[in-house]
Image: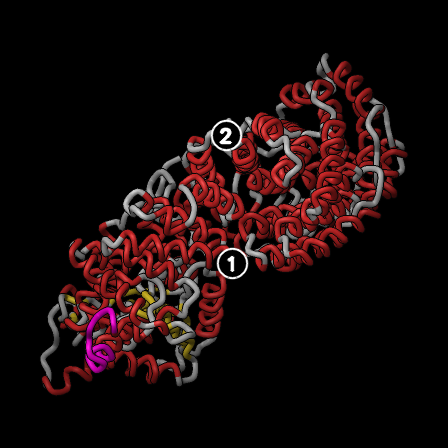
């Protein structure tokens, strides 16, 4: 796809756009409305004004102009000159002149010579005549149809423009005029005229003040998707959002054409930032150059000590920097850069010697004053300052202190960062061993462990490999075992091969009955359980329990109970056992085990069909993971635990939000896999084939994606569903045919796969291979257990699809499936079962039952936005001649161009327009943004002759 530099749609501004629409409606009723649209440079004021103008141009006369600053000189009446030029281009000079008294240009010719020569008159009253001519022209235009006048950048307005605006505000009160004025909020404090104008207007009736906030991370992601024409990588979104702060202009500048985040500071941004700083007084520039070295929040006393400015000079410089919007204050009263990009630009202009001198000043100030070191991360600040000042020994000592503080605070990401700094300083600090009390391999192992808990396995793998290389395996077997176990854990997070090899090797090294062997036993049992090799895992879990009791280690005794419970999940109620493990883990202060047990509870509740309980548990789990410092390590996995039951109960928009939040932290592949899989399920169900195909490709490209049956079975199911949606029946049948050769897996994942595979057999009725595949699937199903109501519901669906694949009716099976899914509260599965039951009812001439089931299925499909299901319902209703109606026609027509539009009769009646707004309300803003992006692409594709949008075939249950 071709990358654009701007998004084709405005994102994250729905509320502001609605406010403008409301103001226009009020103005159109005959009352002047003024909108003051503020925002920082790059916030998107001009884009919003332009998009709004485009929306109303068929109902209004739209004119626009901008105030212009020529190096400190303001061009007189610039916005009105621009608006008049636009009007002349639209209607011609003669037509415009004809609207004025005597059909002559009058004083307007002074602004626009194209209108002719100005009339002779008293120079002292010329300004009044000019204002009157502008007023009369605007009144004439507004008399024809509502007038929208956009004046941009009023922070650069000259005195004449400001006076004319004030005059028009007083004299146009009873005319259908919307006056939109845009300005930079950061200039309010620097331009007295602007501050007075905005203050005066804000107090008046009929004036609305809007301020554009920065985009959220989701808004930035939607903007980048619009630019690239494809979903962006979460890491790129995170990097751009953190650096650009949600400013749309900064987002565009920081985005590389390949979709990655720019490493350095693009020259466009550097020039913008530098120009803002260059306008400030000398003392403010000096302050900012030194403050850029400090980084983060800066206390007043630290700035005073670091800059050497006297109190009066410092206060004056701070006032200038704050007024210019370069610095801001936080709730604690400290100072920070409004955008870190300001700091980057300032740092780029500093000479190395200047940087080193500033770092030394801050380091000496921190060491000299204990009050300045009261912050939690003051040791880290001190380490960075000493390092950049060239004092490596001092930097290492400070960094080691900071690492200990981060570990105590459960701040694993920060601990990793500081330990990497320790290792970076190691060779340059001769007394590193004495200063830390450890050798380098110890520090590398510690850093790798922090990387695992911080959700940074890639960094951890490099560290643990370095540590393994520095250990004598023959002399230090247990240390080797510990490192191999840690590498296996990191490989598991990355979905890399070699996990079992590492763990088996670690077990052979850790022969003594110690905590090291216990740790290896626990991890190996878990790895085998994930591969459904339970018979191999159970002896290891039992040995773990025995060993933990023998050495009196309560932590591993708790873990043994968790692992044994996981192995018994299909035969006993393990939730009470896991709940006890949660309590025990909290008592001994093991956040890792608490997260593990909580994860098991949510996982089990969802597997049993207790979806609402799973949702509540997962939300609590996410909060708790944050509290124990395992934000990336724990929160993202809990996000997938939460998304799954949300999908089950039909809260798909909410699930998408949770998935995006989980992906926003750029989780390890182990977690990313589950989040993407959940998102793909929704994409297939909603007919988002491009999204589903991209996700499937991403999942297949992840290393080791087929290593665990927890992954291989859902992956095969997703592939079948997508092939069916694409009308690739042979492809779907081919995957279905491979199922009997797959390793036996968890019934939780096996039964949904079997139902999808049998749906493929039913769809591929003309394929000669269908019969053999169907028989093989029946054999697998006959030998698969059905523990719990969810698996039994899938089994009922399987029976119904088997009958359909065999050319028979399975109405009883479908009615059983309807009852099962209804009891479980899973609307999407219920709607498919209703559709299949209706099909069989219609075939048996039970038209009333078929109609009732189809109407109910249609209602569910509309609510979920399940496009393929809705298409299937529509086709059956037409074929069976069942009357009825479907709501939300406008939404369907706007977002799904190939569905029936208002006025069509999929059930015999129309699509009632009054239902559209209610249906639209269930879609979150980010979904509307994405829908508009997709619809814009499809419309452009049609205009460019790429053909009409292809209607996908319905996805199977």
Q: Which residues are magenta?
A: 305-316
Q: Earlier in the sequence, mark 2 or mark 1?
A: 1
Q: Crowding near pointer 2: few (<14 within 10 Å), some, many (20+)?
A: few
Of 83 and 16, nearer the camera is 16
Of 488 and 348, nearer the camera is 488
In the rendering, at what x and y percent does residue 21 appear? 47, 66
Magenta stretch encompasses residue 533: no
Identify which residue is drawn at 43% across, 44% down: 443
Image quadrant occupied by the C terminus? top right
Q: Is residue 311 left or right of residue 543?
A: left
Q: Name the front one of labels 2 and 1.
A: 2
In the rendering, at what x and y percent does residue 593 appear? 66, 49
Image quadrant occupied by the N terminus? top left
**Can the viewer see residue 287 in this picture?**
yes
Of 307 and 852, nearer the camera is 307
Identify which residue is drawn at 74% across, 37% down: 878
Identify which residue is drawn at 82% across, 27% down: 784
Residue 716 sits above or below residue 458 on the image: above
In the rendering, at what x and y percent does residue 738 appear? 68, 19
Helix, strand or loop at label 1? It is helix
Of 667 and 933, nearer the camera is 667
Q: Which mark is residue 475?
A: 2
Q: Which residue is mark 1?
A: 408
């Amino acid at each position: 796809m071709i990358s654009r530099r701007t998004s084709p749609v405005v994102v994250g501004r729905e509320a502001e756009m609605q406010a403008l629409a409301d103001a226009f409606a009020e103005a159109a009723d005959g009352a002047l409305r003024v909108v003051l649209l503020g925002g920082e440079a790059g916030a998107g004021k001009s884009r919003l004004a332009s998009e709004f103008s485009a929306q109303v141009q068929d109902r209004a006369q739209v004119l626009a102009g901008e105030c212009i600053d020529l190096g400190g000189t303001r061009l007189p009446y610039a916005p009105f000159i621009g608006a008049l030029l636009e009007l002349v281009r639209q209607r011609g000079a003669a037509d415009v002149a004809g609207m004025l008294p005597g059909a002559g240009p009058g004083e307007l010719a002074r602004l626009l010579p194209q209108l002719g020569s100005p009339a002779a008159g008293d120079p002292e009253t010329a300004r009044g005549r000019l204002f009157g001519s502008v007023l009369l022209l605007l009144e004439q235009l507004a008399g024809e149809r509502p007038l929208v006048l956009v004046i941009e950048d009023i922070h650069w307005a000259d005195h004449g423009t400001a006076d004319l605006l004030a005059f028009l505000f007083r004299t146009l009160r009873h005319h259908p005029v919307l006056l939109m004025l845009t300005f930079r909020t950061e200039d309010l404090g620097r331009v007295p005229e602007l501050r007075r104008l905005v203050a005066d207007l804000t107090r008046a009736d009929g004036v609305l003040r809007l301020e554009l906030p920065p985009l959220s991370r989701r808004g930035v992601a939607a903007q980048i998707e619009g630019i690239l024409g494809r979903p962006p990588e979460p890491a790129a979104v995170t990097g751009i959002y953190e650096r650009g702060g949600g400013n749309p202009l900064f987002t565009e500048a920081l985005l590389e054409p390949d979709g990655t985040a720019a490493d350095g500071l693009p020259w466009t941004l550097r020039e913008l930032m530098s120009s803002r700083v260059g306008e400030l007084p000398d003392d403010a520039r000096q302050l900012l150059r030194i403050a850029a070295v400090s980084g983060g929040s800066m206390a007043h006393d630290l700035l005073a000590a670091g800059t050497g400015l006297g109190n009066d000079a410092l206060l004056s410089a701070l006032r200038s920097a704050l007024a210019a919007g370069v610095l801001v204050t936080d709730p604690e009263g400290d100072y920070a850069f409004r955008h870190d990009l300001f700091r980057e630009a300032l740092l780029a202009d500093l000479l190395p010697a200047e940087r080193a001198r500033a770092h030394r000043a801050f380091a000496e100030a921190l060491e000299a004053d204990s009050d300045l070191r009261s912050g939690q991360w003051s040791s880290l600040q001190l380490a960075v300052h000493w390092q950049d000042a060239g004092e490596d020994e001092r930097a290492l000592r400070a960094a080691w202190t900071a690492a200990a503080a981060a570990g105590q605070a459960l701040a694993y990401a920060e601990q990793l960062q500081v330990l990497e700094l320790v290792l970076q300083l190691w060779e340059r600090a001769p007394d590193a061993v004495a200063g830390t009390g450890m050798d380098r391999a110890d520090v590398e192992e510690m850093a790798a462990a922090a990387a695992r808990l911080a959700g940074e396995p890639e960094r951890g793998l490099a560290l643990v490999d370095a540590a393994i290389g520095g250990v004598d395996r023959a002399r230090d077997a247990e240390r080797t075992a510990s490192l191999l176990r840690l590498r296996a854990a990191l490989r598991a997070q990355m979905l890399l091969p070699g996990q079992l090899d590492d763990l088996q090797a670690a077990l052979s090294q850790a022969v003594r009955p110690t905590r090291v062997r216990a740790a290896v036993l626990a991890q190996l049992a878990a790895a085998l359980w994930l591969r459904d090799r339970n018979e191999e895992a159970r002896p290891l879990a039992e040995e773990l329990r025995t060993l933990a009791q023998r050495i009196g280690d309560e932590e591993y005794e708790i873990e043994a109970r968790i692992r044994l419970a996981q192995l018994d999940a299909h035969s006993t109620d393990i939730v009470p056992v896991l709940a006890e493990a949660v309590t025990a883990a909290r008592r001994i202060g093991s956040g890792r085990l608490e997260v593990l047990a909580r994860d098991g509870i949510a996982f089990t509740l969802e597997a049993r069909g207790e979806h609402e309980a799973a949702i509540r548990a997962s939300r609590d789990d996410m909060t708790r993971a944050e509290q124990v410092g395992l934000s990336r390590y724990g929160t993202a996995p809990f996000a997938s635990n939460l998304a799954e039951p949300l999908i089950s109960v039909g809260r798909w928009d909410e699930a998408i939000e949770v998935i995006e939040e989980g992906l926003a932290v750029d989780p390890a592949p182990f977690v990313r896999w589950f989040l993407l899989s959940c998102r793909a399920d929704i994409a297939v169900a909603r007919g988002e084939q491009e999204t589903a195909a991209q996700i499937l490709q991403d999942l297949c490209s992840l290393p080791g994606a087929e290593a665990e049956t927890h992954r291989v079975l859902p992956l095969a199911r997703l592939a079948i569903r997508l092939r069916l949606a694409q009308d690739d029946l042979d492809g779907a049948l081919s995957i279905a045919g491979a199922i009997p050769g797959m390793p036996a897996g968890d019934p939780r994942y096996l039964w949904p796969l079997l139902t999808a595979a049998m749906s493929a057999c039913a769809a591929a009725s003309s394929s000669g291979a269908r019969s053999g595949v169907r028989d093989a699937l029946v054999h697998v199903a006959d030998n698969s257990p059905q523990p719990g109501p969810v698996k039994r519901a899938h089994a009922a669906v399987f029976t119904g699809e088997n009958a359909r694949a065999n050319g028979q009716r399975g109405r009883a099976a479908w009615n059983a499936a309807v009852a099962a899914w209804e009891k479980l509260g899973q609307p999407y599965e219920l709607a498919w079962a209703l559709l299949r039951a209706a099909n069989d009812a219609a075939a048996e001439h039970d038209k009333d039952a078929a109609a009732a089931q189809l109407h109910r299925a249609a209602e569910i499909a509309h609510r979920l936005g399940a496009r393929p299901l809705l298409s299937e319902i529509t086709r059956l209703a037409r074929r069976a001649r069942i009357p009825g109606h479907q709501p939300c026609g406008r939404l369907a027509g706007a977002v799904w161009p190939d569905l029936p539009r208002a006025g069509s009769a999929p059930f015999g009646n129309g699509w009632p327009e009054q239902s559209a707004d209610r249906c639209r309300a269930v879609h979150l803003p980010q979904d509307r943004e994405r829908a508009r992006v997709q619809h814009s692409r499809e419309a452009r594709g049609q205009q460019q002759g790429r053909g009409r949008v292809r209607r996908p075939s319905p996805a199977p249950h």
